[in-house]
Image (cartoon, rainbow, N blue to C red):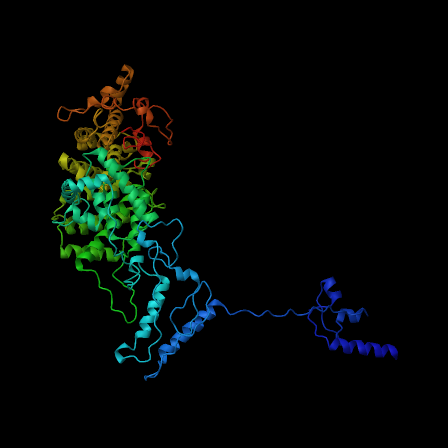
Amino acid sequence: MQQTDDSETQCASRLGITRTSQACQRCRSLKTRCLPGSQSNICQRCCASSKECIWAEAPRRARKLRAPSRISQVEQKIDGLVAKLVNPPAPGPTSVPAESPQTTLPGSRSLGFGGVASWPETWKKESSHAPGSWLPVPISFEPSNPELQHVPDRAPVEPERATRPRDEDDEDDREYVERIRTIHSFGDVEEVSQAPEGLFLPSKRREAPIADEVVQQLLASREADTLLESYRQMSASFPFVIIPQGVTALELHDEKPMLLLAILVTTSSQEHQRQMQLDTVFRQELAQRTIIQPRRTLGLVQSVLVYLSWYHFVFSHKTQQIFFLHHLVIGLALDIGLHRDYQPLNFPHRPKPTPPTPSERRERERAFLGCYYLSSMIGAGLQKPNLLKHTSYMTEWAQNLRAQHEFDSDETICYLITLRQLDDQVQDTLYSTGAIDLPLSDARTLMHVRFLEGQLDAWKRDSQNADAQRLLNLSSSFTDMLLHNVALRPSETAESGTSIDSTQLNALLAALEAGKRFLDTLLSFPMDDYHLLSFSEWMRLPTVIMTVARLCIPTEAHSAIGWDVKIAQERVRLDLCLEALCYRMQQLTTYDKVKQSHPDFWYAMRFINDLTKSWYMRKIRPQVQTKHAQAGGVGSIGSTASTAAMPTPCSDQGFTGIDMSSIAMHDSGFEDGKLSAWVKNTDFDMDQFFDIGLWGDEAYNGMGFGGNMPF
């Protein structure tokens, strides 16, 4: 009886204790499932084994009281403000309560709203803010303007007045928006008191002038106006940044100093020393205005466009930044909203910002179309991805510029953009990763070629009466050659030795005629106009030369498909074209051993074209190469094809004044050594020379474009 009473007492005590465990200690040690048994507080396993069922008691943790979060506090403040806006006080004369003294924290202040808690001291200081950001300026940001060192605190808003006229019943709304605006500090620091006009608009601040002695001398002597007039002629080949007639260099420097500096750099090719000095100034100012103290202006976008359009004058394989700079200008254009229509950020109870004038809108459209044109050209020329794709509004803008015809060159823009879109289709359909190895006999490749041929023919018919006919012929002939260049890919006909494919022969003939048309058009320009051509056109010249050379050099593949290289050689006469180019560039160069010992672009291109001509002659006349190799030299190879009309020094004569040993060759199988010995090698392979990338920094660093050459 006594044992029964003890067990009942133990069960009663267990019933009064709240279990917090999910299993008894024995089941937990065995890691088995603990199921309730027939008796209270005893599991089935313990009941079956007549073991004592012991439950571990774990006291429940006390819940900690959370302090109100900052988000909830802000929500409460906003709810209070909304309540005041929805339920304004009834009009009537009431006395303004005197401000009761209250204790505030050392690092806080009142925002002027009744009953609203103060903000931390970080908002009280309101030091200068980074442009377009509400975050404090980083330590590395050192504003040059002393006025930016400190922005005084805004005066506290007066307490709400007891009476308010009916026409000012929205004062609370404006006050609320003003307070939100000061927190985020939209716009530039100098314009803190003004409402923002939009998120995607350029800065309205006047750009800082170029404080350089060379620039100031050019402005003072009025030579900058002469260079500006020269740029107006150059802009015909790149009509996306136009300087209207009547605008002086001083006026342009006051409004867009970086644009004037870029123009001075590109138009100073006759003064190579000064051009290099201005190039250094431009790079320093560009870094200052984009990285150190970033600015967002249309003039900055236009300056980089002009700089890249004649980049060959300052090109150096060691310092070239073509791909980086053209993405920088795209980023600047996107920052100021050139990629979309004018869409301001409207605030309630504020007048809408004034939209740009039609002239300003067209200027913005030209700049963004120029960004796309350069992006497409550089992407195709360097075989890198084009990150700025063509869109429908680009075509619409180009057509509107052509219809409004503010400048004569606006018509050229429409044709160039349409042709660049066609070029992009050629690159995407015929030269992408999956299609670059497909021969012309492939059904998909042949279909794409015929479709693009129709589009190109339609473009030629539309542009046959355009003013800038030579420039358009130069661009369209390259597109035509690139389209039919797929015929040079190995085909099944050449490998199997079957019958001649007329489709491939027609494509090869079309590529040859397009290359010939490009060279003829280039030679039709007067020699004095060569500096007017933009970098986009000169980038194409190596590709054209090598494509025509491949069509004229005898190979087994050409013999297999029935291609007559003799007729191709007589049709184009590439040797005479190269000789004429060498002669012209010899006349244009400013290099002189005594006066100007730094090789410029024309001297470097003459050197490359002279090498190419010697290589080409050895390829098409192997018997001449054999006889001359036995004589022990290569100097007469170039003279074999020379004519009396265009006398050109051979490869070994015009470059003795330069220490070629400083030009090292890297990659692509070239070993370090003296370039002069490499040039004189009879086994020199021009294919390998161009495969290393003519415009890339991985090829023959500093060769003729700067780099190791002494001033």
Number of numbered markers? 0
Picture coordinates of residue 204, whole percent (x, y): 25, 57
The residue depicted at 18 percent of the width and 41 percent of the height is 474
Q: Is residue 442 visible?
A: no
Q: Is residue 147 visible?
A: yes
Drawn side of residue 310 relative to residue 94, left or right: left
Q: Residue furthest top?
A: 631
Q: Residue furthest right?
A: 1
- Kindly indicate the quadrant of the structure image that contains residue 554: top left
The residue depicted at 29 percent of the width and 78 percent of the height is 169
Picture coordinates of residue 116, whole percent (x, y): 42, 72
Q: For the C terminus, which image quadrant?
A: top left
| Residue placed most toward the observer, 203 or 434 | 203
- Tell me: residue 349, above or below residue 666: below
| Residue placed most toward the observer, 308 or 49 | 308
- Kindly indicate the quadrant of the structure image that contains residue 515: top left
Picture coordinates of residue 465, whole percent (x, y): 11, 48
The residue depicted at 43 percent of the width and 67 percent of the height is 118
Picture coordinates of residue 398, whole percent (x, y): 20, 54
Drawn side of residue 306 relative to residue 496, left or right: left
- Tell me: residue 620, above or below residue 129: above
Q: For the N terminus, which image quadrant?
A: bottom right
| Residue placed most toward the observer, 631 or 485 | 631
Drawn side of residue 290 relative to residue 247, left or right: right
